[in-house]
Image (cartoon, grey):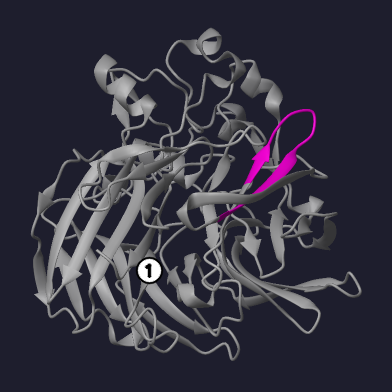
Amino acid sequence: MSSAHAAQPSPTRAPDWLALLGTSEQGGRDYTPEIEGTLPDGLAGVLYRNGPGLFERGGHRKQHLLDGDGLVQRLSIRNGKAHYRNAFVQTPKYMAEEQAGVFKHATWTTRRPGGMLSNLMGGDIASQAGVTVYPVHGKIAARDEGGDTFLLDPRSLATTGTQKVSALSGGYKAHAKLDPDTNEWILAGQGFGPSMSLHVAIYRPMLEKVREFRFDAPRQVYIHDFLATKNHVIFVLHPCHFSPFGFLAGMKSLTDSLSFSRDDGTVLAVVPKDGGAPRYFDVPGSFMWHALNAHETGGEIIADIVAYDAPDHFIGDNPFFASLMRGEMGNAEHPGTIRRYVLSLETGAAREEILDGGNHEFPMTDPRVQLSNHRVGYFACGGVGGLNSGIKRMDMQTGATQLFDFGADNVQVGEPVFAARDETAGDVDEGWLIAQCLEAKSRTTFFAVFDARHVEDGPLAKIRLSHHVPISFHGAWTGQG
């Protein structure tokens, strides 16, 4: 038999329980979950989480684990007890498709039914509000990769309205930064066209916009997150290039129009937070999903992130996050390593440092140190690709770490959200981490509660749901409510 006709290896089946990350949830839950162990005294408030919860309609299924209608969860904890609620964000897309029983819009990884003609000019992509959720300025804000911000009732999770984007930008990215000292909410976005533009908007309490500006970028790439300091906004323009031609012609989804070329290097665009001319710094090529934090000291910007030498779990040949939707394992060879950029504002020099070469995602700090010097970082770690099995605490100054790993065959662990013991008077990094976990044995989800200073001791308690929850990206804790 010639090599051209040699039998191809059969794809490796994914564990059935892991495929639950891409299995839809019904929404509308409202009940008191069981608690294993004892919830710590002083842990009182609400955890909100957001991620895709609906993956199929009318015989069509999303093509990627990262794509689905937003399902917001509310886990309230008080006096050693917990209450759980979830609901789909009532976006115009969700409401129209719920009524029709079919997908009517393309989404960022999946073209809408109807072929090329139905997807001309991108297929009318609409927000699913399924990536982040922010308790900000007395409101609960659910966000996607662009479009409006959807506002939810903090108790019922009913969708109550939207915060419209301005004419300056077609939409801001899902991630935002909140300055704990000024209460400024910093949003960043991008616009595609003959060239790419980068956008910044800053809001004060009551979501009053006080500043907005944009500037042209030196390359056209996909970005997901950014960094900010007290004085600057930093865009990581990694070499994840976007080619719009197949997308606009209706032949490719947005993610299928992305390609990665590490040899092109990464460009860091640093712009004053008040607006002004950007400065550019060159560092080795990598792909960043999420930033930990950045701050300025002694004429330098220190920026800590998680990044990959290549995002093979996300795009390219048989990425893991697409193959898992077919019940198969795919490519995920490159780990998410903890990296630091050191940028000299005086000389223009830049360097990259690898702080930990293991597999990490979902970096988190105590929110009270954002935009300032951070001593500690928390990460989901272990596992494969962007799916993790443990929690790590890292001293960002000494490199010392603490680790607890459930085991990749046992549990998938999501973003560890920090809950302060006392948000106003307590010591920095004194509190707990709450991580959403999918368990192989029970095929259900639990929330693991860790002492943030003693991660290696394992969970103090598990809040056990009676069902599974699909992959959930990001969350936030508030001591209110």
Q: Up-down: is 172 above or below 58? A: below
Decide: is 191 above or below 37. Answer: above
- Disc 1 crowd, CA 10 A, few/some/many (<14, 14-19, 20+): many
Q: Is residue 199 magenta?
A: yes
**Residue 244, horizontal then vertical, whole percent:** 69, 27
**Residue closest to the eye, 479 or 237:** 479
Q: Amino acid at mark 1?
A: Pro
Q: Residue at x 57, y 87 (%)?
A: 399
As for residue 68 lying within the magenta part, the answer is no
User: What number of labels is visible?
Assistant: 1
Residue 313 in the image: x percent, y percent? Answer: 52, 49
Viewer-proximal residue among 401 and 122: 122
Is 349 placed left or right of 294 in the picture? right
For this rendering, which residue is in front, 334 or 226?
A: 226
Where the C terminus falls, by quadrant?
bottom left
**Residue 215 is drawn in which quadrant?**
top right
Kindly identify which residue carries mark 1.
Answer: 416
Give 335 or 72, whichever is nearer the viewer.
72
Q: Quadrant of the N terminus?
A: top right
Q: Quadrant of residue 199?
A: top right
Picture coordinates of residue 403 (x, y %)?
Answer: 40, 82
- Highlighted magenta segment, given as a residue range: 189-203
Side (left or right) of 343 relative to 401: right
Q: Is residue 410 visible?
A: no
Q: Residue at x 12, y 49 (%)?
A: 30
